[in-house]
Image (tube, rainbow, N blue to C red):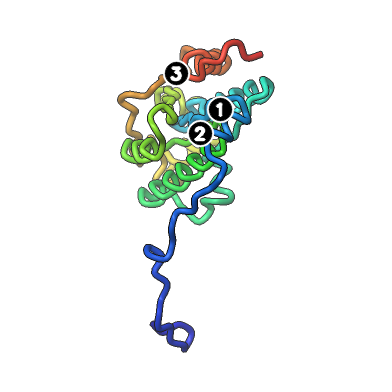
């Protein structure tokens, strides 16, 4: 292989030159140190459905209760780890793949991870789920109709998409595949953000009370 006018006779073979390094401290030990059950709470829903508001409020409540958490937010991740990705279908798939791997590492660290992403494709959410043992991945569908999300539209994104200024926008010219069997569905037309948080704490995390 010729690189910068020099020949490399033995190119790197990543698939055969790496192996899993066994570590002394495992997930169980990390979780016991933190006195909690690590889990990935995967929030999915349209832009404007209330994912970020609920996720932020939930982390605040858990943090105040002494839980060890981390919130992975879709917009924030695209400022760093995934800033090289756009919004084509291929890029969306890679976006979720990277986030899922990060969430897996954080759960391995013993954390309660809140991942808040539109994650529009069922196959991608299933891919994320399969990275975790049974019970460690909880899909939370933040449900609100498209019309309601457009009314909220605090970022003005739907308006731009309707005018053709924003391509591949979920709900307008890119599909959103509704979860068919989420562990929890929260209707934000009927429930306040505070009520949604209480329901997650009660029915998913089984923490009572959190003050």
How many marks overall?
3
Q: Which residue lies furthest to the front in this view?
A: 24
Q: Front-most of 199 and 187?
A: 199
Q: Which mark is residue 116?
A: 2
- Disc 1 or 3, which lies upstream in sequence? 1
**Which labelled disc corresponds to residue 173?**
none
Local secondary structure at mark 3: strand
Is residue 45 something that shows in the picture?
A: no
Q: Closer to the camera, 150 or 113?
A: 113
What's the distance in space between the residues labelled 2 and 1, CA to CA? 7 Å
Q: Which residue does the image show at 36% across and 38% down from the upper left?
A: 130
Residue at 53%, 26% (x, y): give it.
37
- Residue receiving disc 1: 55
- Quarter-wise, where is residue 164 in the image? top left
Which residue position holds label 3? Answer: 186
Mark 1, Cα crowd under 10 Å, few <14 / some 14-19 / many 20+, is many
* Element type where label 2 sits in the image: strand
Position of residue 47 measured from the top left corner of the image (x, y, whole percent): 47, 33
Can I make out residue 96 in this image?
yes
Q: In which quarter of the image is the N terminus?
A: bottom left
Left or right of 126 on screen, residue 200: right
Where is residue 118, by image quadrant?
top left
Tell me residue 44's x, y (percent).
Answer: 43, 31
Which of marks 1 and 2 precedes in the sequence?
Answer: 1
Looking at the image, do the residues carrying marks 2 and 1 touch, with CB atoms under 8 Å apart? yes
Q: Which residue is drawn at 39% across and 22% down?
A: 183
């Amino acid at each position: 292989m010729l690189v910068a006018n020099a020949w490399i006779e033995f190119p790197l073979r990543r698939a055969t030159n790496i192996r899993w390094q066994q570590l002394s401290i495992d997930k169980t030990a990390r979780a016991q140190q933190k006195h909690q059950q690590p889990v990935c709470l995967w929030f999915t829903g349209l832009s404007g459905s209330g994912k970020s508001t609920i996720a932020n409020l939930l982390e605040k409540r858990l943090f105040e209760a002494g839980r060890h958490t981390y919130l992975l937010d879709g917009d924030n991740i695209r400022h760093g780890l995934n800033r090289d990705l756009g919004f084509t279908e291929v890029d969306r798939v890679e976006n979720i793949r990277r986030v899922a791997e990060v969430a897996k590492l954080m759960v391995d660290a013993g954390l309660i991870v809140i991942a808040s992403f539109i994650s529009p494709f069922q196959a991608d959410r299933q891919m994320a789920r399969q990275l975790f043992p049974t019970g460690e991945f909880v899909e939370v569908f933040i449900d609100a109709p498209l019309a309601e999300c457009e009314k909220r539209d605090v970022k003005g994104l739907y308006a731009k998409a309707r005018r053709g200024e924003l391509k591949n926008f979920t709900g307008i010219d890119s599909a959103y595949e509704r979860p068919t069997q989420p562990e929890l569905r929260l209707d934000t037309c009927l429930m306040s953000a505070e009520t949604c948080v209480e329901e997650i704490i009660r029915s998913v995390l089984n923490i009572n009370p959190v003050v």
